[in-house]
Image (tube, helix red, strand yellow):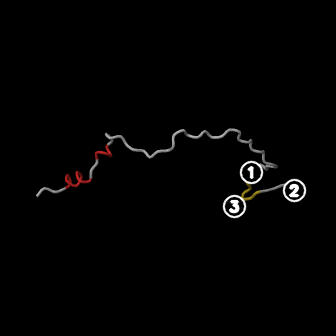
Amino acid sequence: MDGSIHIVYKDRAVLFTAVEELRPRPMVTHQKQQNSQPNRKYVPPPDHPWRRYSLQSQRASQALPV
């Protein structure tokens, strides 16, 4: 009982370094800059492929000819 600390995990000694006291964190002196523009929902441009997609055109192309 010499006052030392030993850590054993699954019957094996674990190496470690004892921390006597934590160093204080520096105080944050600056504020985060606020975005001048609020977040807006993304809207794709008119020529984007998502705009050209149509369910009716897909159904017509998948229809079997009679």
What is the three-letter code of the residue carrying label 1? Leu
Q: Which badge, 3 or 1, comes first in the chain's sequence?
A: 3
Spot occupied by residue 38 in the image (x, y as percentages of width and height): 51, 43
Mark 2 lies on residue = 3
The answer to whether residue 25 is left or right of residue 58 is right
Number of other residues with Cα within 10 Å of mark 1, as a class: few under 14, some 14 to 19, many 20 or more: few
Nearest the eye: 45 or 36:
36
Spot occupied by residue 57 in the image (x, y as percentages of width and height): 22, 51
As measured in the structure, the alpha-carbon distance from the residue carrying label 3 to the one carrying label 1 is: 13 Å
Mark 3 lies on residue = 10
Q: Is residue 2 above or below residue 39?
A: below
> Looking at the image, which residue is at 31% across and 43% down?
49
As measured in the structure, the alpha-carbon distance from the residue carrying label 2 to the one carrying label 1 is: 17 Å
Number of other residues with Cα within 10 Å of mark 3, as a class: few under 14, some 14 to 19, many 20 or more: few
What is the three-letter code of the residue carrying label 3? Lys
Quadrant location, the C terminus? bottom left
Residue that protrudes farthest toward the left in the picture: 66
Element under disc 2: loop
Nearest the eye: 30 or 20:
30
Nearest the eye: 37 or 52:
37
Label 2–label 1 contact, CB within 8 A: no
Element under disc 3: loop
Q: Which mark is residue 65?
A: none
Label 2–label 3 contact, CB within 8 A: no
Quadrant location, the N terminus? bottom right
Mark 1 lies on residue = 15
Q: Is residue 9 above or below residue 19?
A: below
Q: Is residue 33 above or below residue 5?
A: above
Report which quarter residue 12 is drawn in.
bottom right
Residue that protrudes farthest toward the right in the picture: 2
> Looking at the image, which residue is at 74% across and 42% down?
27
> Looking at the image, which residue is at 79% across and 49% down?
19
